[in-house]
Every structure is written in C-alpha cells, then in structure tokens.
Image: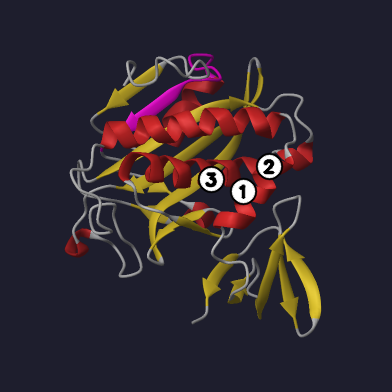
Amino acid sequence: MRDLLAAVPRWGRVRVVAATGSTNDDLATDARAGRAHPGSVLLSWHQQQGRGRLDRVWTAPPGAASATSVLVDVDGVPAPRVPWLSLVVGLAVVAGVERSTGLRPALKWPNDVLLDGRKVCGILAERVETPAGSVAVLGWGLNLTQTSEQLPVPTATSLALAGARGVDGLAVAAAVLTELAGRLERWRQDSEELLAEYRRVCATLGRDVVVHLPGGETVTGRALDADPSGRLVVDVAGRPRAFAVGDVVHLR
C-alpha cells in the first residue's frame, strides 16, 4: 500500500489490518488521544461494526469488501465548506473506481456510489475534536467481490457483480486515495470545479425523487440541482426547495 501511495504526499501513516470493529471509530479514538494526525489512513478487509449515514449498519463477509478511513484537518475551515467533504469523497470513489476497474459509477445524492443503479459504496464523515484542533474522519465502505447471495439487500452490488475482473482491493484503494488527495486540495481552495464535477456524475439530478426527511416528512418532486452548499434542490409542486439532509429514493 505504501508503495502504491508513494507519489501521493498527502497520506502519511497508512495502516492495513485484516479486521476491526469500525475504521472510523478507530481513527477517531486515536485522533482524540493524539496518536493519529491528518493524513493518517486506516484500511480493513473486514469491518464488524460498520456504520453508514443515519446510523445504518454496514456488514460484509471477510475479504469481500474494504473499509477505509482517513483524517483531514478542518481547523479554521469555514463552516459552510465542511459538509462538502462527504461529497468530495463520493467524487473520489467514482473517479478511483473508474480509474482502477474501468467501471463508470454515479452518485445518488448526497454520496451513495452506484453501479447500474445499485449501491456499491457508502460514505460517512464525522467531525472530531483533538488536542491539536478539529479534524474530519472520512470513511467509505466499498463492496469488492460479494456475490448476490452475500449482499445484505437486493439494491446493493459489488465491483465484481458489476463486471470488474480480477478485483485488486489494494489497487482500488490506492486509486481512490490518489483521487481524493487532489480533490481535497481543490476543496480547500473553494474550487467551483468540484460542484461542476458533482453535477456531472450525480444521477439524482433530473430525476423524480422522494426525499425522506428527519422527523418523518416525505417530499416528492423533480431533483433540479445541487447548490454551492451541496444541498439538493427539488421542484416540489412548482416551487424549489433545498435540502441539506435526507434520504433520497429515485423513482422510475
């Protein structure tokens, strides 16, 4: 892994483990204790207590998926920029998977990575306070070689099921981390390129959707755009509404 990332200066300490409870939890614990710093990477081939957005559980057979988490310094970053980090990870996964496998994923707002309309990767970003300041723990779980019988839900898929041959988990991880390093630099510069890229790869835009909001409200409409804050803009009964959080279902 270190050799694969030798040309990517952002990533410092890279650890690869066979199994753990949660890579996000492990890095967050180490960061709070001063044992891990921005640029740290933790990759596991079996995550036993993985979590996704809205505290959903994420599991996979040992060796069939990878869980990766990284630490990013957010101290002093303007508050409106921080939520963009989870979208930036989504862009990096899309680009890294295409680079390493030839497959062409898309995003479902905000950051679910899809192949052929099925979820192949979930992303979770969390803010952590450390002795040296604020950091973000950015984690993603990527389905590599699961068979259809091993997937937890019929709306999921894996790289292998989507047609990737001879999936090399380390090569995929290195490609994603390489793509992420460049996008983090643009994120710090508040680059409009990221928003343009997001609009290109987000399969939600232009679709009829149902948005399930915290508190139980459900909204149906046409997804129009992602705004500069990363919010989803939906035409609801002829009026645009912007949503910062929510669970989106694509309507056929």
Q: Residue at x 55, y 56 (%)?
A: 201
Q: Residue 25: x and y, percent? A: 45, 34
Q: Secondary structure at mark 2?
A: helix
The boundaries of the magenta stretch are 33-45
Q: Residue 196: x and y, percent? A: 67, 50
**Secondary structure mostly seen in the magenta stretch:** loop
The amino acid beneath tag 1 is Glu
Up-down relation of residue 199 to residue 169 (above or below): below
Q: Name the residue tied to disc 3.
A: 91
Neighbor class of circle 3 (other Cα within 10 Å; few <14, some 14-19, many 20+) is many
Up-down relation of residue 208 to residue 103 (above or below): below
Q: Secondary structure at mark 1?
A: helix
Q: Are marks 3 and 1 in contact (CB under 8 Å)?
A: yes
Q: Name the residue tied to disc 1.
A: 197
Q: Are marks 1 and 2 in contact (CB under 8 Å)?
A: yes
Quadrant, the N terminus:
top left
The extreme right residue here reads 239
Residue 134 in view of the camera: yes
Neighbor class of circle 1 (other Cα within 10 Å; few <14, some 14-19, many 20+) is few
Q: Residue 90: x and y, percent? A: 52, 47
Q: How far apart in space, not on screen, are marks 1 and 2 (Cα)?
A: 6 Å
Q: Quarter of the image holding residue 22? A: top left
The amino acid beneath tag 2 is Glu
